Image: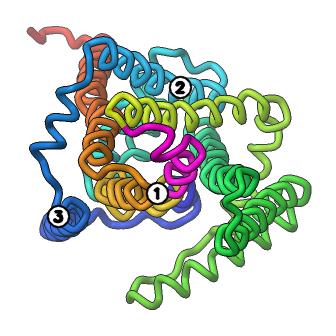
């Protein structure tokens, strides 16, 4: 999301993809998702999966719904922390609509960025005031995705499961997180460093694009220096609520997974909460690059393979992951569509109200 927003700000305008290209992209994405899910769910006893889901009591299901609704609310906290002046209802409409787009369309993150600009613009936010929360929330989200695996691996090590591979992974994660934070801090302290980071990032992106026959990027050093100048004020005054809201959002999503596993029947003796946190963190990290809309297929593969490998019963694990994804991946879609349509009706109405009245018109 952050990289896409930087391209929107710093790169020249691109022609919209042709209809044929979008169709081909959608078909290829659907094939990829189907292949991942088939591989993940093959040899699964779906009768046992359904029996585990039906075995949940009404109290357990009600608890899951309440926790899932709380998880949806936490998304608004992040947007409100990053966007001074944004109201809760606006944040709800924005976050759920963009989530619905991201969960259903190929390259949905890019469409979500465009929708964010349109929505915030309709509420009086300028493009510069819109770009800033997109970038800051993206950076903090990336820090959380890097930090959670480090935390989980450290907890596993303290628990006594400090295998050489886990220690190596933890050290690599710590190094990556420290490097990312150090680069970010250096960018904020020095305009020259921010410009240099933009140049290096642009060169790396251009080399990667050259491998697939795409033109190089331009203007990333301008984007990073602009990002620095606009970010200093926001981060210096609101870094604590932004950090707290981001952590609450990620941990609330983890709570939905943990409670779902316990309600379906995966006990702590089979897979403890630290192992679940580690798998959740790596599933989140795996979706840092949006290969599929909303990480569909990728998240299921990481969670199911990891939880079964950790000792979970496969029908119970599959049942829990499917319920978890229904609550966190599917549930935001109808909510987002409904809020989007409501926003469109309000936007059309406001435009109608502001339209000039011409004498003699009906």
Q: Are marks 3 and 2 in contact (CB under 8 Å)?
A: no
Distance of label 1 from label 2 (alpha carbons): 29 Å
> Taking 41 as reference, is 361 left or right?
left
Q: Who's the residue at 34% across and 60% down the image?
A: 301
Image quarter of the C terminus: top left
Label 3, residues with CA under 10 Å away: few <14, some 14-19, many ≥20: few
Whether residue 267 is in magenta: the answer is yes
Residue denoted by label 1: 310
Label 2, residues with CA under 10 Å away: few <14, some 14-19, many ≥20: many
Label for residue 74? 2
Label for residue 94? none
The part of the chain drawn in magenta is: 266-282
Picture quadrant of residue 248: top right
The mark that comes first in sequence, 3 or 2, is 3
Label for residue 42? 3
Secondary structure, mark 3, is: loop
* Number of marks drawn: 3
């Amino acid at each position: 999301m952050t990289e896409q927003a930087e391209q929107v700000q710093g790169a020249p305008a691109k022609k919209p993809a042709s209809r044929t290209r979008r169709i081909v992209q959608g078909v290829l994405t659907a094939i990829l998702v189907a292949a991942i899910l088939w591989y993940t769910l093959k040899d699964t006893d779906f009768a046992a999966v359904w029996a585990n889901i039906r075995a949940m009591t009404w109290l357990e299901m009600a608890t899951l719904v309440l926790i899932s609704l709380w998880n949806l609310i936490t998304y608004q906290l992040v947007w409100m922390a990053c966007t001074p002046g944004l109201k809760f209802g606006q944040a709800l409409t924005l976050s759920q609509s963009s989530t619905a787009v991201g969960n259903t369309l190929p390259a949905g993150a890019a469409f979500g960025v465009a929708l964010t600009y349109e929505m915030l613009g309709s509420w009086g936010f300028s493009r510069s005031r819109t770009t800033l929360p997109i970038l800051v929330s993206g950076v903090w989200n990336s820090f959380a995705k890097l930090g959670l695996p480090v935390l989980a691996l450290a907890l596993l090590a303290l628990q006594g499961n400090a295998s050489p591979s886990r220690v190596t992974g933890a050290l690599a994660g710590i190094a990556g997180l420290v490097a990312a934070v150090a680069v970010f801090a250096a960018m904020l302290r020095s305009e020259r460093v921010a410009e240099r980071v933009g140049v290096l990032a642009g060169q790396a992106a251009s080399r990667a694009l050259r491998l697939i026959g795409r033109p190089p990027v331009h203007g990333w050093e301008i984007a990073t220096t602009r990002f620095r100048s606009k970010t200093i004020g926001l981060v210096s005054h609101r870094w604590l609520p932004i950090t707290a809201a981001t952590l609450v959002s990620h941990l609330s999503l983890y709570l939905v997974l943990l409670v779902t596993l316990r309600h379906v029947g995966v006990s702590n003796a089979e897979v403890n909460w630290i192992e679940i946190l580690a798998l959740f963190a790596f599933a989140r990290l795996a979706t840092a690059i949006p290969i599929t809309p909303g990480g569909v297929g990728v998240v299921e593969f990481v969670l199911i393979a990891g939880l079964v490998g950790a000792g979970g019963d496969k029908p119970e694990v599959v049942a829990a992951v499917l319920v978890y994804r229904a609550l966190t991946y599917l549930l935001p879609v109808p909510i987002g569509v409904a809020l989007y349509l409501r926003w469109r009706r309000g936007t059309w109405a406001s435009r109608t109200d502001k339209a000039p009245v011409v004498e003699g018109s009906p």
